[in-house]
Amino acid sequence: MITGPGRFTYVSRGHTSTGPTEWIKSPDDPRTRHHRCGGPPPQRRQHPDPRAAARRSADPAGDRAAAAAAGGGRRAVLVMDADTTLSPEFLEVAERNLTSGVGGVGGTFAGRPCASALGYLQRMEFHRYGQVAKRMGERAFVLTGTGTLFSYGALLDVREQRRTATLLPAGRSFYDTHSLTEDNELTFALQTCGYAVRSPVGMWATTDVMETVGKLVGQRERWYLGALRNIAQYGRLMPFHMRWTYWRQQAGLLLSALVAAFYLVALAVSVMLLGGVDFRWYWTLPSLILLAERVWSVWAMGPRARLYAALFLPEQLYTLLLTFSYARALVKFVRGDKGAWVAT
């Protein structure tokens, strides 16, 4: 798909019992399969002052794109999960958006077809997440490991910045293989180095859903704990706009967990002391507005999604389950527990 001098390399992510494996060395690595379009192999670029190159340049991402081009032309690496199916137009849209200064173009994940209610609730969650991505102006919140096209020059730059440990936390390679959420961490790294990350409309990656409570809690606990650890790892290395985005998300998750705990305690006290819940009439209109929004946001998915949203209770129980997963991850984070990789 990438035209002109360069290569288009496909890499399927693998995992071990302790975390993601990484063996991307270059498009010439025999363990990858690639389409050769000509051009010399990329040369590693040297930054005499990495922080100045990234932060003080008038256009740091543009400087890096120019350096990548000088190092061997236009190259890209497609990373995807082995259980993911990409939409037919995925690569075409990704290539069109992988322009100068863009570090990666990620897809929007969708859940595979399933029979269980739990799996379908995840499909509804993913569908709504896709709508949020549109409202973000096609800026990616996370370059998802289910399917992302990376600029190879940007990956080389990330590896170099890890080795100098000036812009990024110290490391030796493209991915941080010790991270529980390596795709989230790499998104942080690219943005900290000055690259844009995009998630345009038309790039769908259909992936697995968890159809048991145990697997779902294990998956989400890993996601939440990994994100918390990534944020703590980067700290003030993050530019302000990233801190505003990602720290604010964690504040929202914490607030939702506190509200959920307060709600459950208040509900229990009301039932024990009053024998039931006293519903006030003035909550009718806000409740109907919320219910209408939930139904409308999944309308395109069809009758089953509309029914689940209209019933309200299934999604509320699902949300409480996710909040429970976040609370477990938060406790582990506060205790300094590094967590463990859980195959999902």
Image (cartoon, rainbow, N blue to C red):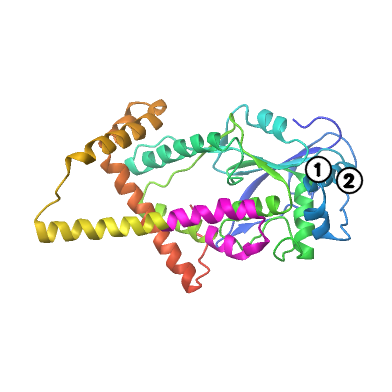
Q: Is residue 218 visible?
A: no
As measured in the structure, the alpha-carbon distance from the residue carrying label 1 to the one carrying label 2 is 14 Å
In the displayed orientation, state which residue is furthest to the bottom.
335
Q: Is residue 134 visible?
A: yes
Residue stretch rendered in magenta on the structure: 227-254
Which of discs 1 and 2 lies nearer the camera? The answer is: 1
Q: Looking at the rendered structure, which numbered label has been put on residue 71?
A: 2
Indicate left or right for 328 with 65 as reference: left
- SS class, disc 1: helix
Q: Looking at the rendered structure, which numbered label has been put on residue 12?
A: none
Indicate left or right for 66 with 181 as reference: right
Identity of the residue drawn at 81% across and 43% down: 62
**Badge 1 or badge 2: first in the primary sequence:** 1
Indicate left or right for 16 with 100 as reference: left
Label 2, residues with CA under 10 Å away: few <14, some 14-19, many ≥20:
some
- Percent coordinates x, y for residue 120 in the rendering: 37, 38
Identity of the residue drawn at 54% across and 33% down: 134
Q: Is 117 contained in the magenta span?
A: no
- SS class, disc 2: loop
Is 256 above or below relative to 288?
Answer: below
Q: Given the image, on which type of amino acid does mark 1 rest?
A: Gly
Q: Looking at the rendered structure, which numbered label has been put on residue 62?
A: 1
Is 246 above or below relative to 143?
Answer: below
Asked whether the beta carbons under mark 1 and mark 2 sit within 8 Å of each other, the answer is no
Q: Is 243 contained in the magenta span?
A: yes
- Percent coordinates x, y for residue 264 in the rendering: 25, 57
Q: Given the image, on which type of amino acid does mark 2 rest?
A: Gly
Identity of the residue drawn at 27% across and 55% down: 263
Quadrant housing the N terminus:
top right
Asked which quadrant contains residue 286, the reply is top left
- Percent coordinates x, y for residue 45 in the rendering: 87, 53
Is 107 above or below relative to 332?
Answer: above
